[in-house]
Image (cartoon, rainbow, N blue to C red):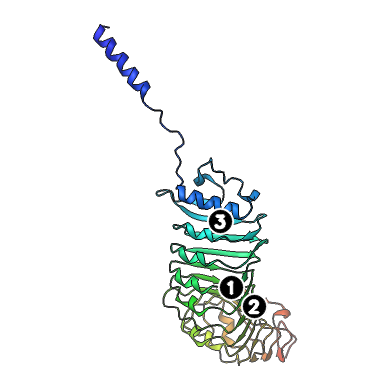
Amino acid sequence: MNTATTLLLTLSVFLFLSLPAPSLSAERCNPNDKKVLLQIKQSFGNPYLLASWVSTNDCCDWYQVECDPTTNRIISLTIFAGNLSGQIPAAVGSLPYLQTLIFRKLSNLTGTIPSAIAKLTHLTMVRLSYTNLTGPVPAFFAQLKNLTFLDLSFNDLTGSIPPELGQLTNLDAIHLDRNKLTGVIPEWIFTGTVPDVYLSHNQLTGPIPKSFGYYNYTTLDFSRNMLSGDLSFMFGSNKTVQIVDFSQNMFGFNLSNVVFPASLTSLDLNHNKIFGSLPEELTTLDFQYLNVSYNRLCGKIPVGGKLQSFDATSYSHNQCLCGAPLPAC
């Protein structure tokens, strides 16, 4: 090896060694997002549930958060099933790219739903359930036009249902069940996707609005309220509903001439004031569940289909209903 070659090789090695070492663990997390998450942790008193939220670690690796793989912004905050006390902090509204927000199965989570959530316009899923949240169902959810799923069930929410929620045109399901909601069900005019609606176990009164009859649902659960009136308009041959639970209310109407859709697989009307007879066409439906007990029905139970596959408790305590599985007429 000649002198020139040796010098060139030595210079190359020197330059290589002078270069800064590449980072093996470059931080992905946006610093603003990290700051907000640490504020949220502090507002809850630095609970063990958020022990992985340490400032020296990349927040994209923290438990219960998710970063977008391209932008590295926080897109999901899922705080679930742990010992966490306090109120949802307003700082949550400072995660501008959040798509999923979940606080669930947190029995010591209290207070009202903060208005700061209204700033999170990218949200597609909100699940604030199985907590001790109080106060009203906020009308500001109507501003979150990208919402496809809204779950506020199993809380202590009070007041009436905001009619503005009917403006959520991308909603697939809304869960307001297991609260302490009062008043009437509002006239929801769905101009886009028609969501499955869960309103059970509240204290709602009055009739079901006629606007509900204009649309097709998959699941409707209005059970265990104080609703009344005629709901026969909710059915019809052109409907696509599959699961209906209107049990334990005060509905009163003649069942005899109601036309049920072929899609119906579960029908629960128990503990109402429904009268008339069971339509013969019920024998053509592929029922997985049926309960018409504790009403004022009369006549013979039609024979055929799935009707005799249910035991007597599905038909008991009616005025004069008879035939298998009840005693013969």
In this view of the protein, which residue sits in the foreground, 99 or 309?
A: 99
Q: Earlier in the sequence, mark 3 or mark 1?
A: 3
Instruction: Name the amino acid type tagged 3.
Output: Thr
Q: Look at mark 1 in the image and give the residue it sits on.
A: 176
Three-letter amino acid code at disc 1?
Leu
Q: Which mark is residue 78?
A: 3
Image position, residue 44 (x, y; %) = 62, 55
Residue 194 place in picture, x, y as percent: 47, 75
Label 2 with label 3: CB-CB less than 8 Å: no
Q: State the residue at coordinates (31%, 18%).
A: 12
The one nearer the camera, 238 or 221, is 221
| Cα separation between marks 3 and 1 | 20 Å
Q: CA distance from mark 2 to mark 1?
A: 9 Å
Question: Distance of mark 2 from mark 3, alpha carbons?
Answer: 26 Å
Q: Give the camera-side residue of 291 and 217.
A: 217
Going 64% across and 82% down the picture, which residue do you hit? 269
> Is there a contact, CB below 8 Å, between mark 2 and mark 1?
yes
Task: Name the residue type under label 2.
Answer: Asn
In this rendering, does residue 243 appear at all?
no
> Is residue 99 left or right of 322 when viewed as pictured?
left
